Amino acid sequence: MSEPGKRSFSFEFKLSVVERFLAGEPAAELAAEHGLSSPTLVKTWARRYRREGADGLRPKPKGRPRKPPDDPSGQPSELERLRRENDRLRAEVAYLGKLRALREQGRR
C-alpha cells in the first residue's frame, strides 16, 4: 500500500535529474520543472548517487527478505525431524499424564 500523495519515480528519471543537478543546474529549478515536492529530494538523490553510485537510485525491495530454504531437496533435515518427534512425544507424555490423573481422580 502506498501512502496518499506519494509518487514513485523511475530509475531513469532520477538518474537524469541527478546528472543535470551535478552538471550545475539548481535543485530548485529542477524540482519546479519536474513537479517534485521539494529541491531537497533532488539533493537527497544526488547524495545517494555520490555515496552508492547509480544503483543507489534503483528502487529497493519492500518488506522482509524471504527465508532461504534450509534444504534444497525439500526434505526436513534429521535434526528438524528429531525435534518434531521430540515435540510430539512431549505432547503424548503430557496427555497420558493428564489421563492418568483423571483416572486416579475418578477412583477416589
Image (cartoon, grey):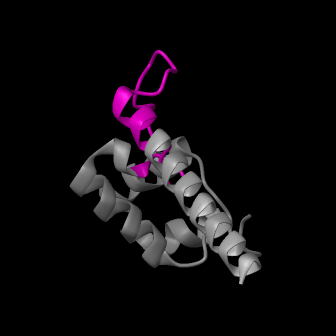
Residue 56 is a magenta residue: no
Residue 80 is a magenta residue: yes
Q: Position of residue 5 (x, y in %)?
A: 74, 75
Instruction: Determine whether 32 is above or below 79 in the image.
Output: below
Farthest residue toward the front? 108
Q: Quadrant of residue 108?
A: bottom right
Residue drawn at (40%, 55%), measured in percent from left and top? 18
Q: Nearer the viewer, residue 89 or 11?
A: 89
Q: Position of residue 6 (x, y in %)?
A: 68, 70
Instruction: Determine whether 35 is above or below 40 in the image.
Output: above
- In which quadrant of the rendered image does the N terminus lie? bottom right
Q: Nearer the viewer, residue 48 or 21?
A: 48
Q: Position of residue 103 (x, y in %)?
A: 71, 70
Whether residue 33 appears in this view of the structure is yes
Q: Nearer the viewer, residue 18 or 48?
A: 48
Q: Does residue 38 appear left or right of residue 45 in this picture?
A: right
Farthest residue toward the top? 73
Classified by dominant secondary structure, the portion drawn in magenta counts as loop
Whether residue 63 appears in this view of the structure is no
Residue drawn at (56%, 56%), measured in percent from left and top? 91
Q: Does residue 25 appear left or right of residue 16 in this picture?
A: left
Q: Does residue 74 appear left or right of residue 51 in this picture?
A: right
The stretch in magenta equals 57-83
Q: Position of residue 38 (x, y in %)?
A: 53, 79
Q: Quadrant of residue 35?
A: bottom right
Q: Nearer the viewer, residue 75 or 59?
A: 75
Farthest residue toward the left? 51
Q: Does residue 102 appear left or right of residue 23 in this picture?
A: right
